[in-house]
Image (spheres, rainbow, N blue to C red):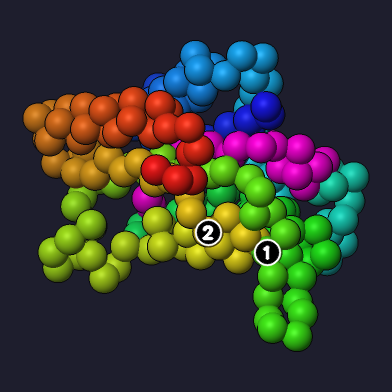
Amino acid sequence: MQLLHLDSSIQGETSVSRLLSAAVVERYRQRVDGIVVEYRDLAAAPLPHITLPGFATDAAEAVLAEFLAADVVVLGAPMYNLGIPSQLKSWFDHILVAGKTFRYGAGGVEGLAGGKKAVIVLSRGGVYSEGPRAGVEHAETHLRAMLGFIGIDRPQVIVAEGVAMGDEPRRAAIDAALAAIEHVAAAKEPAEA
């Protein structure tokens, strides 16, 4: 099994999404013999934003090939300014490629990456899953939409929210997410959980 691990937080060692995405990968290492993990730190080594001259270059093709080779993709994503980091959006711009990961047909768009599993590990400073701010949460919804567009329509989602609301809420959010990771990583089929 090939696993692609992506981190996009600029927070380094203090990042909750990095902590939790690493925990997901570690659970996979524990339960899958011979797993091969590729790691890409999109904050430390950001991909260029897509331009016409930069489209389909050797570097862009390598990013797409890395994704296509993966059976499982673990996305570590903080929510910045109500959405995903631009570094992560740029990665998606490299892998959402007509004829490779999706195509248009008589019935509309068809995702071509449906055999892959995805785990979204999302951190949020505030609470956006419910209440008055739920309508402005555009990180999880955007990630689900982009993955669904290419056929990965049942990603696992682990969310730690309220992590900037004090030490106690931060710890509670991390503990709850770690408990969810134990459940997710124990599932036979990640997308089935």
**Can I make out residue 12 in this image?**
no
Say which residue appears at 64% left-offset and 54% top-offset. 114
Q: Is residue 64 above or below residue 32?
A: below
Q: CA distance from mark 1 to mark 2?
A: 9 Å
Say which residue appears at 55% left-offset and 62% top-offset. 148
Say which residue appears at 79% left-offset and 67% top-offset. 98
Type of the residue with mark 1: Gly
> Mark 1 — residue?
111
**In this image, 154 relative to 48: left or right?**
left
**Image x and y of residue 139, in percent:** 40, 57
Whether residue 69 is in magenta: the answer is yes
**Image x and y of residue 168, in percent:** 9, 30
* Residue 116 placement: quadrant: top right
The quadrant in which the N terminus is found is top right
* Residue 32 placement: quadrant: top right
Mark 1 secondary-structure assignment? strand
Of residues 45 and 32, which is closer to you in this image?
32
Type of the residue with mark 2: Asp
**In this image, 166 relative to 13: left or right?**
left
Mark 2 secondary-structure assignment? loop
Q: Is residue 132 above or below residue 55?
A: below
Region rendered in magenta: 62-80
Q: Do tag 1 and tag 2 residues touch (Cβ < 8 Å)? A: yes
